[in-house]
Image (cartoon, grey):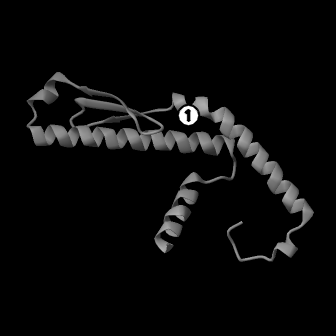
Amino acid sequence: MFGPRRSPADITEAELARHAQEAERITAWSEQVESDLEEIVGTGTGASGHIVATVTAEGKVRTVIIGERAMGLDSRTLAEEVLSALDQAMADAERKTEELIRENLPGFDPSGVAALFERLGRLS
């Protein structure tokens, strides 16, 4: 699809029909997957293991649990641990989201698409 440029005249009716079918399948799936995405929760833990964070697939922070022992950390270390736990939780939610997409849209690579959009953004 993103390969060498083709003349529109070279596109066959069968290709158009196949792409239209694929678009319908993706549209139907995207409507159904909203509830699945709402259930995704990523979890991350700080280096000491005393801080646990959870986030949604959209990146909203749901919880940050600071264990009693973490309160003995200096403020800078505590902040680093919280941020680390949140980073891990976001990465976990992203991984789960990509897994859901791959399971439901075989052959679609969300990471590859994200990289392509990033490259395109640098061109503009």
Q: Residue furthest top?
A: 68
Q: Which residue is mark 1?
A: 37
Which residue is nearer to you in this view: 23 or 70? 23
Q: Residue furthest front?
A: 124
Q: Is residue 23 left or right of residue 42?
A: right
Q: Residue furthest right?
A: 13
What type is the residue that disc 1 sits on?
A: Leu
Q: Residue at left 52%, top 28%?
A: 39
Q: Is residue 58 left or right of residue 99?
A: left
Residue 3's place in the image compared with 103, above or below, is: below
Image spot of residue 21 (x, y percent): 82, 49
Which residue is nearer to you in this view: 42 or 30? 30
Q: Residue at left 32%, top 32%?
A: 53
Question: SS for tag 1?
Answer: helix
Image spot of residue 30 (x, y percent): 66, 40
Residue 92's place in the image compared with 14, above or below, is: above
Residue 47 showing in the rendered view: no
Image spot of residue 69 (x, y percent): 14, 26
Residue 24 showing in the rendered view: yes
Q: Residue at left 76%, top 43%?
A: 25
In which quadrant will I find the N terminus?
bottom right
Image spot of residue 45 (x, y percent): 30, 35
